[in-house]
Amino acid sequence: MVKIIYFGIPGRAEVARLTAAIGKIEHEDKRVDFEEWQKLKQEGWAPFGQLPVLEVDGKYLAQSAAIDRYLAQRAGLLPADPWKAAQADQAYFFCEDVWQTLYPSFKIKDPEEKVKARQELLAGALADKLKLLSKVIEGRAGKFLTGDELSHGDLAVFCNLSTLKSGWLDGIPKDVLNDYPVLKDFRNSVAAVPAVAAFYADAKNNDDIRTTGFRADA
Ligand SMILES: N[C@@H](CCC(=O)N[C@@H](CS)C(=O)NCC(=O)O)C(=O)O
């Protein structure tokens, strides 16, 4: 039994939750609110004082990438071939680069300024990143990034694009992927994987962000 500890949003824990579900890894999806976290943080078990943390047999693992790769290996979603694993990783880590372009906008307090900043990103730095991601996905080895087998890289791209189009980020429209047909089709093909679709059909894995962003487009 492992425990995925994070806040009640998809954020940096969604790949882990999805991976555990797909791999039928017995787990607890422990969601804490920010106030509770302020107290838990003082207990000192989170290796770097942040979430997500994965608890495994009384030990604690931090860093979402480490958690996701560990669970992916247990779930059979980490390609055994080193080159394929590296290809999955390059897409996985590029998702972080995509978010890096957006993070400064989270700190903008004025709602109108925030929307304006994100619209500018959507026409500039974010667009550049999404175009690059499209190109890599267009050149993929098969149905998914490394061939016809699903990997942690596919799940990371899926989760990040789904969050982007969820309407959760003021200034980023729900139809954002219409300008990126390769990303839109790819996201839909991951959403249609039976185990992924089953995960989001389960009421306990649904909330506003997931309902509007993570399912296959109608
Ligand atoms: N590089 C880390 C970043 C972790 C991180 O930024 N966690 C944030 C939430 S996404 C957090 O715990 N914030 C609350 C805090 O720092 O106390 C990872 O990928 O896990």
Image (cartoon, rainbow, N blue to C red):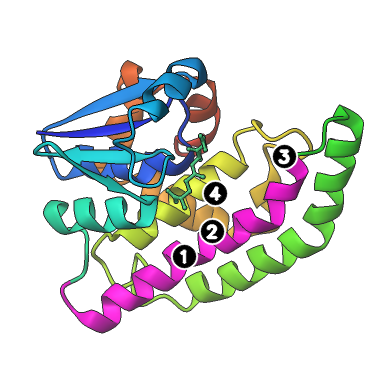
Q: Which residue occupies 61% across, 43% down?
A: 164
Q: For the residue marked with disc 2, what is the amino acid?
A: Glu
Residue tagged 1: 93
Mark 3 Cβ inside 8 Å of ligand 1? no
Q: Inspect this view and state whether residue 154 appears.
A: yes
Tag 1's secondary structure?
helix
- Measured Cα–Cα span from mark 1 to mark 4: 14 Å
Q: For residue 175, which quarter of the picture?
A: top right
Tag 3's secondary structure?
helix
Number of callouts:
4
Q: Is residue 75 left or right of residue 117?
A: left
Q: Which mark is residue 96?
A: 2
Mark 2 Cβ inside 8 Å of ligand 1? yes
Give the mark, 4 or 2, whose residue is nearer the N terminus: 2
Q: For residue 134, which quarter of the picture?
A: bottom right
| Image coordinates for residue 171, horizontal then vertical, percent | 79, 38
Q: Nearer the viewer, mark 4 or mark 2?
A: 2
Q: For the residue marked with disc 1, what is the amino acid?
A: Phe
Give the mark, 3 or 1, whose residue is nearer the N terminus: 1
Residue tagged 3: 106
Where, quadrant-wise, is the N terminus in this rendering?
A: top left
Q: Which residue occupies 57% across, 68% down?
A: 133
Q: Main secondary structure of the magenta part?
A: helix
